[in-house]
Image (cartoon, grey):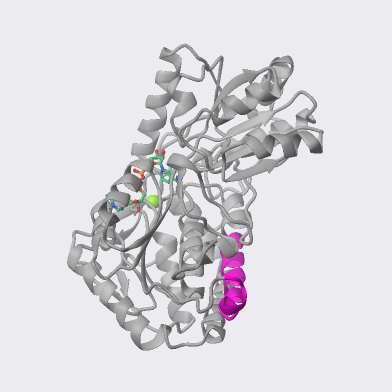
């Protein structure tokens, strides 16, 4: 081992109390699924973790029926104050079992333990605490005269932040008085199933939350179920479109949180070292599997070379490897399919004429890995400048004037997030005002808070999650 290299510091898996098989969580109990069970693996070494039940249409129907009964008989009759008590209890149990949840998340998803431990799981708890506080205040928040729940919410979440997306969906739905059927992503069901154990521990009334594991067909059955009143989805734009079509004309309410291609704009007066840290966090956090990732760096021409030099130096210090190692900065790509997509788009980037540079990392033999990569000389027309790579790949473009930066930033079919790096407060305000993005960070990136609404424009979807706005999606007639 050379000077300044880190010794391995793996977080122990012994805290996990994994079962070999996980059933569907319906009506407060784990039950068998009717489809063929599937195996969830660790993307870091492809080792199987557990066998997971697959819900078919009939299973989804059972789950929706359980949610309906729980809504009619228990949850819709309960006071907001009492609903809030359950949410507080869940939040505290998430904190109590935080280490276990973090280890499970990193194992199943491939993200570094320092992220699951310091970002994902604490945010999950804060989301439940935050919405617990809203449950008894719905009448006093300008949400209409008599805000009422929709009924049964069908929720479908992706694999990039499995437990955090669960919290973003379940916490506001329950606070507003809905019951839930949630479908986790097929590569990352584990933390949702441990969360189901937490619901049992919290004595949440049976059927208030049901978790059906499976793949796209399970999600499609949930979206199309006639007794689902509200659909909430986070995932790809393609599936989002399919869902919008499926619910059109049915009277179901729908919110979609889809992809992004965020511009991270660095002006020449920005503190460069801080901006470089922000750029790294913006695109290499969670292996770039982030819908609001700062995947397009727009850097002012006069500082381009300096920024790229410092960026390469910084990327060369990132440690890629075992997600459970506390020193790891870059974990595994979530699946073979996602790795193939990242490779394909990166190869296209080269063919289209951009210049590729990758950090010199030791790629582990097993598992799915992709070294942090930047493309310079990217044109706005290149596919790596337009399409969501959803991986550790940064496309760098330049600009000369603030107007050009804004025009380039807005030149995207998406509109989820953006970042601005500059020394001038007035410039932050002026530029942010003209960016067509749901969230604009200034001199920071990828910061989340349960009180802050999150959501996009255009192909990034519609509806807002988080804050008071996030409640309106789960209430009848409430305007944001
Ligand atoms: P996906 O959109 O297929 O998967 C997301 C969730 O939707 C999963 O739970 C999946 O089982 C479910 N699903 C799939 N087909 C469905 C259908 N017809 N009806 C209802 N639910 C369905 O995303 P995938 O294939 O895993 O990733 C493909 C690309 O999508 C990524 O490369 C990335 O660009 C983008 N993506 C964006 C996310 C975001 O947060 N914005 C999250 C995940 C993927
Ligand atoms: Mg997995």
Q: Quadrant of the C terminus?
A: bottom right
Q: Residue at x 49, y 74 (%)?
A: 176
Residue 5, how many percent across, how many down? 68, 35
Residue 164, how many percent across, how many down? 51, 58
The answer to which image quadrant residue 347 occupies is: top left
* Front residue (pair 344, 146): 146
Answer yes or no: is residue 17 visible: no
Q: Is 384 drawn above or below residue 206 in the view shown?
A: above
Residues rendered magenta in the picture:
121-142
* Front residue (pair 137, 22): 137
* Front residue (pair 245, 442): 245
Does the magenta-highlighted stretch encompass residue 126? yes
Counting labels gives 0
Dominant secondary structure of the magenta stretch?
Answer: helix
The answer to which image quadrant residue 335 occupies is: top left
* 209 to the left or right of 171: left
Q: Is 68 drawn above or below residue 310 in the view shown?
A: below
Answer yes or no: is residue 347 visible: yes
Q: Quadrant of the N terminus?
A: top right
Q: Residue at x 69, y 34 (%)?
A: 431
Q: Residue at x 67, y 38 (%)?
A: 432
Residue 270, how many percent across, how many down? 78, 29
Seen as rendered, the residue at the extreme top is 353
Does the magenta-highlighted stretch encompass residue 59? no
* 39 to the left or right of 421: left
Residue 246, how many percent across, how many down? 26, 53
């Amino acid at each position: 081992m050379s000077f300044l290299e880190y010794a391995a510091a793996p977080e122990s898996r012994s805290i996990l109390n994994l079962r070999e098989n996980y059933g569907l969580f319906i009506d407060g109990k784990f039950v068998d699924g009717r489809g063929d069970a599937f195996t969830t693996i660790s993307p870091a070494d492809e080792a199987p973790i557990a066998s997971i039940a697959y819900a078919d249409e009939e299973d989804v129907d059972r789950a929706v029926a359980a949610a309906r009964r729980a809504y009619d008989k228990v949850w819709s009759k309960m006071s907001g104050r009492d609903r809030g008590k359950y949410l507080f209890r869940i939040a505290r149990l998430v904190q109590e079992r935080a280490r276990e949840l973090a280890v499970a998340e990193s194992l199943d998803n491939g993200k570094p333990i320092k992220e699951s431990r310091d970002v994902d799981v604490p945010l999950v708890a804060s989301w439940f605490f935050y919405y617990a506080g809203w449950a008894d205040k719905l009448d006093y928040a300008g949400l209409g005269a008599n805000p009422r729940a929709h009924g049964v919410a069908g929720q479908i979440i992706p694999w990039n932040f499995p437990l955090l997306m669960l919290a973003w969906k379940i916490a506001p739905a329950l606070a507003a008085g809905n019951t839930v059927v949630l479908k986790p992503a097929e590569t990352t069901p584990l933390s949702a199933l441990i969360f189901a154990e937490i619901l049992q521990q919290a004595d949440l009334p049976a059927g208030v939350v049901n978790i059906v594991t499976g793949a796209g067909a399970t999600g499609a059955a949930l979206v199309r179920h006639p007794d689902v009143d509200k659909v909430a989805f986070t995932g790809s734009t393609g599936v989002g479109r399919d869902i919008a079509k499926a619910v059109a004309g049915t009277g179901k309410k729908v919110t979609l949180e889809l992809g992004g291609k965020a511009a991270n704009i660095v002006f020449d007066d920005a503190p460069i070292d801080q901006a470089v840290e922000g750029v790294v966090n913006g695109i290499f956090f969670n292996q770039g599997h982030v819908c609001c990732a700062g995947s397009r760096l727009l850097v002012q021409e006069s500082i381009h070379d300096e920024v790229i030099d410092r960026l390469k130096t910084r990327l060369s210090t990132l440690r890629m490897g075992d997600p459970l190692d506390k020193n790891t900065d870059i974990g595994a790509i979530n699946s073979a399919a996602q790795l193939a997509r990242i490779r394909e788009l990166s190869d296209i980037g080269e063919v289209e004429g951009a210049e590729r540079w990758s950090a010199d990392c030791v790629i582990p033999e097993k598992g799915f890995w992709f070294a942090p990569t930047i493309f310079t000389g990217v044109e706005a027309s290149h596919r790596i400048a337009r399409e969501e790579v959803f991986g550790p790949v940064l496309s760098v473009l330049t600009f000369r004037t603030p107007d050009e930066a804004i025009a380039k930033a807005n030149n995207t079919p998406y509109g989820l997030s953006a970042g601005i790096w500059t020394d001038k407060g007035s410039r932050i305000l002026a530029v942010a005002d003209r960016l067509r993005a749901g969230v604009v960070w200034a001199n920071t990136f990828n910061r989340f808070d349960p009180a802050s609404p999150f959501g996009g424009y255009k192909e990034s979807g519609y509806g807002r999650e988080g804050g008071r706005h996030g409640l309106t999606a789960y209430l009848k007639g409430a305007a944001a």
